[in-house]
Amino acid sequence: MTKTILIIEDDTEINNMLSLLLKHNGYQTVSAYSGTEGLLAHSSNIDLILLDLMLPGKSGDEIVAELKSKHNVPIIVTSAIHDVGKKVDLFSLGVDDYVTKPFDNDELLARIAARLRMNTDLVVSNIIKYRELVLNKNDFTATCNDMPLDLSKREFMLLELLAANPVRTCTKSLIYDTVWDYENSADDNTLNVHISKLRKKLKECSPGEDYIETVWGIGYRLKK
C-alpha cells in the first residue's frame, strides 16, 4: 500500500524538491506551507510528516503536540539548526527523528523508510492505556475497569487526547483544534458538556475514581 507523506515546509523550492523526490521513490505527498496549513492538511490518510521548524505563524516545534494528538504518525524534523539542546527539546516534544539541512537525499529516504517500518507495529496495536482506562484507536472502542464505555465520536476523541498526553494539561485551544478540528461550533459550554458526560460515564465504570481534573483557566488533564 502506497504511503502518504505530509511535507510542511514554507520554502516553495524545497517543498517542491521533496515532493518530487518522494514521488520518484514511490510515495504520495501532500504539501503545506505553514504550521496552520499543516494542521489542517494532517489526517488519517497521512503516514509520516516531514516538518520544517522555521514556519510562518505557528513554528514547527509549536505544532508537534497538536500534530501528534490529531493523528499520531512519525514526525521527522528538517532544519538548519545544529544546536544539540534544541534537538533534545524536540525529541521530548514527540519528534521521532531529526535531519539537518542541507541533507543527503539517500539518507533522508533511508530515515523515512526506517520510521515507517518502526511505525507498522504501533499502528496495528494502537492501544492507549491509563490506569484502568483502555482506548483502542483501531476500532474506536474504550473500556474502564473492563467495562465498555459508550462514547460519542467527540467524547472518544476528547478522552483519547487526554490519555495520549497524561503528563500535561491539554489547553482549551488544543482541545478545540484537535477534537473539533477548527469548527466554529466549539465553545466553553460545548466542551464543559462533553467533559461532564465523560466524567459521568467513567464514574459509572469506576465509582471510587476520578479520572479528569480541571485546570482552572487553562484546560483539562487526567488525574494522576
Image (spheres, rainbow, N blue to C red):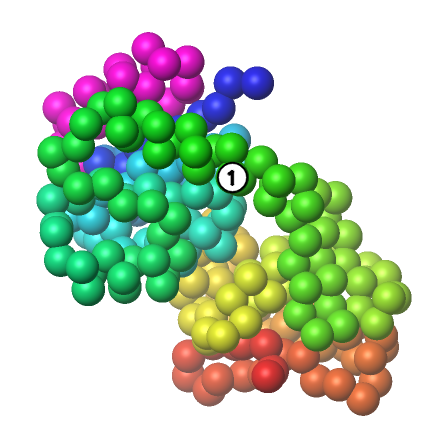
The residue drawn where x is 48% and y is 63% is 175
- Residue 163 in magenta? no
| Residue at the extreme right of the image, as rendered | 147
In this picture, is 135 found above or below 12?
Answer: below
Question: Which of 121 and 152 lies nearest the eye of the viewer?
Answer: 121
Vertical order, 166 against 150 (above or below) = below
Q: Which residue is mark 1?
A: 118
Image quadrant in which the C terminus is located: bottom right
Q: Image point 48% across, 33% down: which residue?
A: 116
Q: Is residue 160 visible?
A: yes
Q: Quadrant of residue 24?
A: top left
The answer to whether 86 appears left or right of 134 in the picture is left
Q: Measured from the top left, where is residue 191 in percent x and y?
A: 56, 68
Residue 141, given in percent of the width and then of the height, sits at 77, 52
Number of numbered discs present?
A: 1
SS category of the residue bearing label 1:
helix
Decide: is 99 above or below 220: above
Q: Is residue 37 visible?
A: no
Residue type indicated by callout 1? Met
Judge whether 35 appears above or below 84 on screen.
above
Name the residue: 12% across, 50% down: 81
What residue range appears in magenta?
10-30
Question: Which quadrant would residue 218 be assigned to in this image?
Answer: bottom left
